[in-house]
Image (cartoon, grey):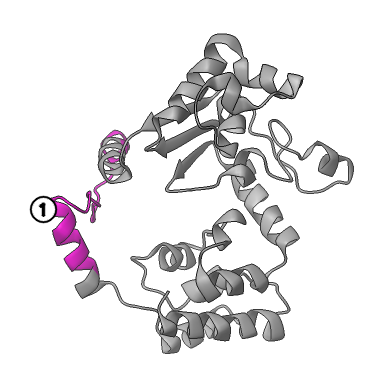
Amino acid sequence: MGLRTERLAEDLLDLAVNKFNKKYSLEFLAGLGADPMTMIGAAAYKQIPVLVSIPQLVGGGAVGLCIGDSISIHDRCAKNAEILGNADVIIESGLALAQEIHDGPFETYTGHGIWAQWDNKPVYSLKGKHLIRFDLDENLEKVWQQQRDSSKIQKAIADGKPKTKITGVPFRMEMSGFARLETSIPIVGDLGEIWPIVASRVAKDLDIKLDFMSYKQETTQGKEMREWIVDNVKYIDRKKLKIGLNEYEL
């Protein structure tokens, strides 16, 4: 993260904690001053929640720490649970650690939320939801297929056996919940190649005209896209942020 971004994150954290008493996440506050072509900017404009998952806070430098401290862990998990609970389709893309989705503290079907339900916490269930993961790791599909063929993952859990030895592949923690979910779908490939195909087909089926399309960075279109982003997408504007705070009467 750049120094300006880290300093801005610290200022936003001060707002989140001392002015708003941890009522609003740093992502929301930052979105008020962000370009609408960015994820947080578009979310603020459309009034759609965007939240960083707990595992993804690690590795974000001071920004990750400030995001994590802007609201409590309980509140972040509860807000994420609400988003996931209301979703019909969940896509995991570019997400290194996904336990919060299918092994989270408030997920009741494959996760650890069964006890939270007793305490009237904001639980949700992945049962019947379509969970799609874009991943470069071919082992994800192998583990997923083994579970389909012989329930091998579930048996390993029931018997308390190491999944790496049972499956014969390097096993990642998030593979367990993903493979055991009956409606999960693994798509193995490069995100830069998968997303343009998925986005264009979905847009065609929904009769939506896309004003901007992302491409794999190494391609000619991808290089042009990066140049366009540098020339057109603006960094967070503090003046715009103040205007946004006033418009929301914050």
Q: Tell me if 233 is positioned left or right of 71 in this view.
A: left
Residue in view at x 52 percent, y 22 percent: 168
Residue in view at x 65 percent, y 73 percent: 70
Residue in view at x 63 percent, y 33 percent: 126
- How far from the left and from the top, in percent, is residue 151? 61, 14
In the rendered structure, which amino acid carries the disc numbered 1?
Thr
Q: Tell me if 34 is positioned left or right of 247 in this view.
A: left
Q: Quadrant of residue 86?
A: top right
- How far from the left and from the top, in percent, is residue 146? 52, 16
Residue furthest to the left: 220
Q: Residues within 10 Å of mark 1 (few under 14, many from 20)?
A: few
- Stretch in magenta: 202-229
* Position above or below: 142 against 90: above
- Magenta segment includes 185: no
Q: Tell me if 202 is positioned left or right of 155 in this view.
A: left
The residue singled out by tag 1 in the image is 220
- How far from the left and from the top, in percent, is residue 48? 52, 59
22 or 219, nearer to the observer: 219
